[in-house]
Amino acid sequence: MSDQGQLIDFYPYRDRFRTYHRLEPEGRDRRSILEELAIMAAEEDRIGDAGRVSGSIYHGDHDHYEFLTEAFRLFAHANVLQRDMYPSATKLEAEIVAMTAAMLHGDGQVCGVVTFGGTESLINPMLVYRDRGRAEKGITEPEVIVPSTAHVALDKAAHLLGIRLVRAPLGDDWRADVEWMRSHITDNTVALVGSAPNYAHGVVDPIEELAAVAQERDIGMHVDGCLGGFILPWGEALGYRVPRFDFRVPGVTSISADTHKYGYALKGTSVLLYRTPELRRYQYFNYPDWPGGIYMSPGLSGSRSGGVVAATWAAMVSLGERGYREIASRIFDTAARIRAGIESVPELEVIGEPTFLIAFRARELDIYHVNDHLVDRGWRLNSLQLPPALHFCVTRPNTAPGVAEAFIADLRDAVEYAKHPVRSEPRSGALYGLGGTPSGNEALNMLFNAALDAMYEVAPGGGG
Ligand SMILES: Cc1ncc(COP(=O)(O)O)c(C=O)c1O
């Protein structure tokens, strides 16, 4: 549910395929199962394959996915917790971490873990800073200060870990307001967070300044590079203006970088790096007194499939620096053309100084009307709020010839449409505008709870 503005049909297959409410007495033949899955996959891939989707599909080449799936297949059934059976997991995970650390200019001390995704790569460091604050400073009511644009997984982390998350405003340049963050540090503050870049606007926070403040106050500084960690380094190497955000910056103590985004791996992995092994220790969970045996685990996850680890390693090794740089070159070039196209439309305003993800809003028009028209033309952008805006996160499928030009042409038409929309309430903005007040938030929460319930219900009235 990354784009709650769109209304979703959760059960498009209810009238076409059998709905299972319980295990059948007898199993079904494999071929018909695979045929049914292949129909769903082919229909669903059509959206991403058209090259008109923002974010989500980062590589997009089916040949690449087939290669990764082959690597996945070899270890799909393996449990990476069981290193006696699967020592390959040690080789593959350690090398994924080492390659990522080198890309982000980590020295010999920098270490890390492979996690199940960006969310875990944000929850774990919050645990680390909370527990370090408790162990080293006796802090019992920990606080973390993050820019208002920092990813919502940090709110999830704070909710789970009993941390007070303090949301800082942005400056006029849409980056974190460093002075505000500095002046809100208290004796309970255990860490600051900045994004490289943030999900909403693709803007990199002033990491060097934030890290200097963190260092001065002896607190953690986490850089959320979940989105940008695997592409910004190549943008910098290509000569694009990319602010420093990695371990070259003194005071940066941890960085998350998602392999399942611009690392071009399969979904289900991310890398979390720490400046020192001492920090990483705070996230280990060991339990020697359990009747089930002596238990140790590096983070939140228990058993994990070796398949995604093997596929991630295979993606990184097969692409190498040249592969990442070539794709980044196409993405940065496409993003620059899209940005120029948006800037050429007087009714629109690009937000901040973007990198490969361009966010924009409308001066006089309802941007969600603009989106409605783009949706009708087959585009799938991401709707933002506070303020209302859209973003286009450029990925490899968007770099195909003609895509940027087609987008700009459709965007111009969409702006014209938004001047005289056929309906007064835009479809895309159906849920936006409800938030921000207690009663509005309550209504949204009820809707979201119902939607989440619906995701785990078998198709109502589905053919059985
Ligand atoms: C900047 C940033 N941080 C964290 C996340 C969360 O990552 P995940 O969805 O893999 O948990 C995202 C996801 O888009 C992101 O863009």
Image (spheres, rainbow, N blue to C red):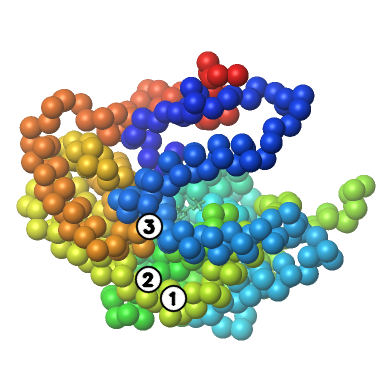
- Image quadrant in which the N terminus is located: top left
Upstream in sequence: badge 3 or badge 1:
3
Q: Is mark 3 within 8 Å of ligand 1?
A: yes
Residue 66, quarter of picture? bottom right
Residue beneath disc 1 = 323
Q: Mark 1 falls on what kind of element?
A: helix
> Which residue is found at the position 16% from the left and 25% from the top?
423
Residue beneath disc 2 = 327
Q: Is mark 2 in CB contact (under 8 Å) with mark 1?
A: yes
Q: Is residue 12 left or right of residue 386?
A: right
Please, what is the three-letter code of the amino acid marked with disc 2?
Answer: Ile
Which x, y percent locates residue 155?
A: 50, 45
Looking at the image, residue 385 lies above or below residue 262? above
* Of 419 and 433, the residue lying toward us: 419
Q: Residues within 10 Å of mark 3 (few under 14, many from 20)?
A: many
> Which residue is found at the position 72% from the left and 67% from the top?
89
Q: Residues within 10 Å of mark 2 (few under 14, many from 20)?
A: many
Residue 78 visible = yes
* Of 249 and 230, the residue lying toward us: 230
Which x, y percent locates residue 96?
A: 60, 71
3 or 1: mark nearer the eye? 1
Q: Is mark 3 in CB contact (under 8 Å) with mark 1?
A: no
